[in-house]
Image (tube, rainbow, N blue to C red):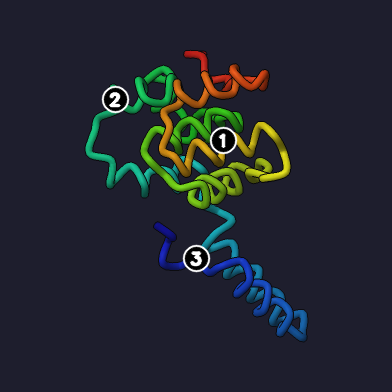
Amino acid sequence: MMNKLEKETDDVYEILLDTDSTEELMIFIKDLEKTYLDMSFGEHYRQYLDNFREGHQTLARLSQIDKDYIYQIINGKRRPDRDKVIALCLAIGMTDRECIRCLERSNYGILYAKNKRDAVIIYAFKNQLSVLELNEKLDELGLKPLAVSKR
């Protein structure tokens, strides 16, 4: 579910390559700020929550993150770490690509298929594993589980 104002990275890159003057560059940067860069993870995540029919209690259970902490993340009072972003994305059934957008919004590294732990996380998104199932799989493979403790 891409924000209608967002463009694919390749499209944005092509626009940037066609930018020839400082004036055009300034317009390009302002457009980025309006449509992409200024939106926090919480704001971006709320767009997905609109389609999540369950309540925050269920989200807390599925993500393995305390409900009050989730409220603080969504309201921009706390910045979630990378593992919590992944857990929140997985909890509401996002795809790996949607999760990558959320990681970008949070200024974290994207999921990288050549990284063993990230490969398992991508597998979890593809196979719609729960956070608990993902952590069991990571542990089974001797990899660090998602750090999603209550605080």
Badge 2 element: helix
Viewer-closest of 94 and 33: 94
Three-letter code for the amino acid on which mark 2 is drawn = Thr
Viewer-closest of 96 and 64: 96
**Decide: marks 2, 3 in contact (CB < 8 A)?**
no
What residue do we see at 48% from left, 40% from top? 125
Q: Nearer the viewer, mark 1 or mark 3?
A: 1
Viewer-closest of 93 and 84: 93
Viewer-closest of 67 and 35: 67
Q: Which numbered tag is attached to residue 58? A: 2
Residue 29, by quadrant, is bottom right
Query: Which residue in the rendered view is the most extreme toward the right?
Result: 21
Three-letter code for the amino acid on which mark 1 is drawn = Ile
Residue 120, by quadrant, is top right
What residue do we see at 60% from left, 29% from top? 81
Where is residue 111 shown, x and y percent of the image? 63, 43
Q: Is residue 28 above or below residue 124?
A: below
The numbered mark, 1 or 3, whose residue comes first in the sequence reads 3
Badge 1 element: helix
Disc 1 from disc 3: Cα separation: 25 Å
The numbered mark, 2 or 1, whose residue comes first in the sequence reads 2
Label 1, residues with CA under 10 Å away: few <14, some 14-19, many ≥20: many
Three-letter code for the amino acid on which mark 3 is drawn = Glu
Q: Which numbered tag is attached to residue 6? A: 3
What residue do we see at 43% from left, 19% from top? 64
Disc 2 from disc 3: Cα separation: 29 Å
Query: Which residue in the rendered view is the most extreme toward the top?
Result: 150
Q: Is residue 20 above or below residue 102?
A: below
What residue do we see at 39% from left, 32% from top? 91
Query: Which residue in the rendered view is the most extreme toward the front?
Result: 140
